[in-house]
Image (cartoon, rainbow, N blue to C red):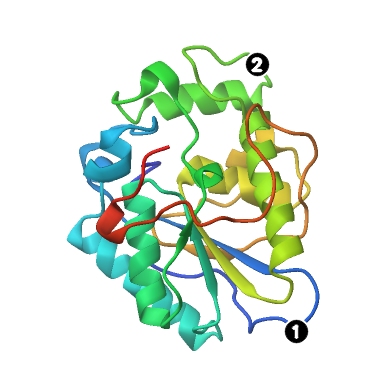
Amino acid sequence: MTHDHRTTATTGTMGTTGADDGPADIWVLRHGESTANVDGVIVSMPGPRALTEVGLTPRGREQARDAARSARAQGLDADTLVVSSDFARALQTAEEFAGVLGARPPRCDPRLRERRFGLHDEGPASAYDQVWEADRARGEQSEGVELVEDVAARVGQLLTGIDESAPGVPVVLVAHGDVLQIALAVGAEADPHDHREVPHLGNAVMRRLGSGRGRGSGHGAGSGPARDAGCGGDGSRAAR
């Protein structure tokens, strides 16, 4: 998804990976520049557009590789577990990133899919401002927009599952703007409705997640560790 036109491929303040035991060292990486970013449209609903058609631009692929080179210079290596949304723009980012690190192919988890923007889907990116204003006001969302608390719940469940299944292993979650802004708020133990107060995560920017995991369960979010959901090459996978 696009939030603005800042598309810098950098990492946050990174350190070396953690010890052999303990909770997973989790990082978040937003996808590189996508064709939807360039077109200024929202693509958030599962279907052919999100799953296969809206992928990275050449610039977005290079941003993903640059992010991996920066991550590798800071200590991430082939042992890193890369878990991705199955939307094409995120999965292509994950594949480029994992390839540069020499890591295993990314796993897919649908809990990392973009927040659903309902009837705003395929409309102009300017609609984000309306949604975020309602988030800040703790107001009702309309037009089929996924609630912040439901996004926070599915992400929190994924994070808890990773902690249980991959202690001490560096993990990079590759996903989308709103999902990762909310994840960062959850990690910081902040109210996820205030996700826009979290410093903006630009295209192919990577940042370490805090230790917060949130509470509650979203509708149909499921639980358990990150799972291989049939990721295929170049953004193809079994639709769910």
Q: Is residue 20 left or right of residue 51?
A: right
Answer above or below: position of 76 versus 180: below
Q: Where residue 10 appears, x then y in whole percent?
A: 43, 69
Residue 233 appears anywhere in the view: yes
Circle 2/circle 1 CB separation < 8 Å = no
Mark 2 or mark 1, which is nearer to you?
1
Answer above or below: position of 72 versus 182: below
Closest to the observer, 173 or 70: 173
Q: How crowded is the residue under tag 2: few (<14 C-alpha within 10 Å), some, or many (20+)?
A: few
> In which quadrant will I find the N terminus?
top left
Q: How crowded is the residue under tag 1: few (<14 C-alpha within 10 Å), some, or many (20+)?
A: few
The alpha-carbon separation of the residues under discs 2 and 1 comes to 42 Å
Q: Amino acid at mark 2?
A: Gly
The residue located at (48%, 87%) in the rendering is 73
User: In the rendered image, which residue does mark 2 sit on?
Assistant: 139
Q: Is residue 232 left or right of residue 163?
A: left
Q: Is residue 198 left or right of residue 145?
A: right
Closest to the observer, 229 or 199: 229
Residue 7 appears anywhere in the view: no
The residue located at (45%, 25%) in the rendering is 117
Q: Is residue 47 left or right of residue 196?
A: left
Closest to the observer, 67 or 167: 167
User: In the rendered image, which residue does mark 1 sit on?
Assistant: 19
